[in-house]
Image (cartoon, rainbow, N blue to C red):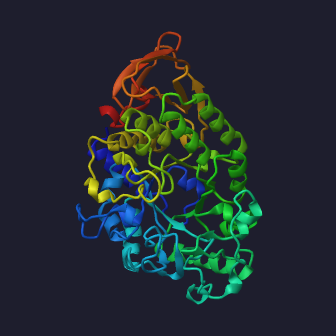
Amino acid sequence: MYTPVFILFLSLFYALQPCSAAGASDWRSRSIYQIMTDRFARSDGSLIAPCDPKERRYCGGTWSGITKRLDYIQNMGFTAIWISPIVQQISGETYEGEAYHGYWPQNLYALNPHFGSEQDLKDLVNACHARGMYLMVDVVINHFANQGEIVKYENFVPFSNERFFHSRCPIDWGNQTSIEYCWMGDGFVTLPDINTEDPQVIDTWKKYLNSAVSQYGIDGYRLDAVRNIPKPVWSDITRSVGVYMQGEVWDKNPNIICPYQEHMGGLHNYPFKEMATTVFTTPGGNLADLVEVAHQMQIQCKDVTLFGLFMENHDNPRLGSFTNDMARLRNLAVLNILTDGIPIVYFGQEQALAGSLDPLNREALWLTRYSTTNNLVPTFTALNNLRNYIIKSKSNAPFVSTLATYSLLGNNAMSVRKGNVVLVITNSGQGVNTDVVVEGFGAGVELVDVLACRVMHADGSGRLKVTLVGEPIVLYPASLLTGSGICSM
């Protein structure tokens, strides 16, 4: 583990990096902690304030609450946060609850008062930057929100006229034109689809996005519902806004997702996520399927290392709803942090929360008391510390832009090599013995498993024989860890 002095050194290192107008190359080295603002931390610091996610109501999380809990995030080695949309939402209770999540926008030029004041948001950004951390804001460009069947266009700011929206029609999810022009939502909360082909609409959005970067110091944007807007529109927007943007195309097919990277910095790596969580939550998962998906993403996408690499988010069931086997969750954590892409960890994943479908996967983190033991906090801390150290030390070819190579080690185990890092992972489950042989090391090289802090040696042929017991192994050359503080080296 890192010493306090070395943690301070890393904080100073990142603090010296530019924190404004952060482009794709700047974000490539980051590790992101995704926060649902309403559910992460309260301004009053309460650890007992009730929050029943089934009620779909505001629970009291705020920007100042996040600011007060940045130690918790940074101590796990995360170097950026992604927060919920910040703009004012529809107000009051609907049949589908309140707009605590931020995806029912109504006024682009006002902040969500439930989350705090303009100064609170600026204080959060400044606190992040003082620590050398980046801040990404979720943004909804596709639609505005309306309660009920009768759309009150006059309530939408600045698009207060029906002419700024597409004609109403239900989406046919098998038809791309319908996806781009028709409306999401239902009769309780309708989501009028903004006419993003209107030059006035796009000009307004570009000015807003750039002004928010200038006004608040935002370092990047997460783009909601990317597939619902035509690709050329995204090119126009992303060329005009000087920060990295990562988009959501919720599909497991690389053929659908990869083309969108021609129009923005990166996307969420849904194909990898879907296959990894399928393969590693049961012993019957076919590891060869994951290898194939990883390979297809590498060859079909412009640059998969700029994709967001995640295993949980606010729209998908938590891993803990599929399995309570901590060994399986640790194997997925290893893939999450140390394979191709920019790691994104959804708040509460480190606590092994078990909420299933929305809204159950949106629990209040304060009820965990931000525990750092008997969960995945130590695992994510060790993984992030190694990744941050490698990036800082530049001891080999650039780690973040090096593509991983995947090798099967039998039916239930595989290795992943990325630079000098070698992952040995299994989906056999806690306590199940799996004998494997990993090749490709130097003869007799000394290796450190940074999760268990044990030393291993390859044989004279550069092969390492090891028995897995369900837990992942993360190997790094001992010679490259000297002075790192990792595993007391």
Please give the name of the residue rendered at 48% of the width and 77% of the height, measured from the top-left corner. 89
The picture quadrant where one finds residue 287 is top right
The picture quadrant where one finds residue 482 is top left
- Camera-side residue: 88 or 391? 88
Please give the name of the residue rendered at 63% of the width and 76% of the height, measured from the top-left corner. 192
Please give the name of the residue rendered at 77% of the width and 64% of the height, measured from the top-left corner. 177
Q: Specify whether 187 is left or right of 114.
A: right
Q: Specify whether 40 is left or right of 164.
A: left
Q: Is residue 60 above or below residue 15?
A: below
Count of marks placed on residues: 0
- Camera-side residue: 106 or 387? 106
- Where the C terminus falls, by quadrant? top left
Q: Is residue 476 above or below residue 34?
A: above
Coordinates of residue 452 in the picture (x, y in percent): 34, 29
- Where the N terminus falls, by quadrant? top left
- Asked whether residue 158 appears in the rendered view, the answer is yes
Coordinates of residue 278 in the picture (x, y in percent): 54, 38
- Asked whether residue 235 appears in the rendered view, the answer is no
Coordinates of residue 417 in the picture (x, y in percent): 55, 30
Coordinates of residue 199 in the picture (x, y in percent): 74, 79
Q: Is residue 437 above or below residue 51?
A: above
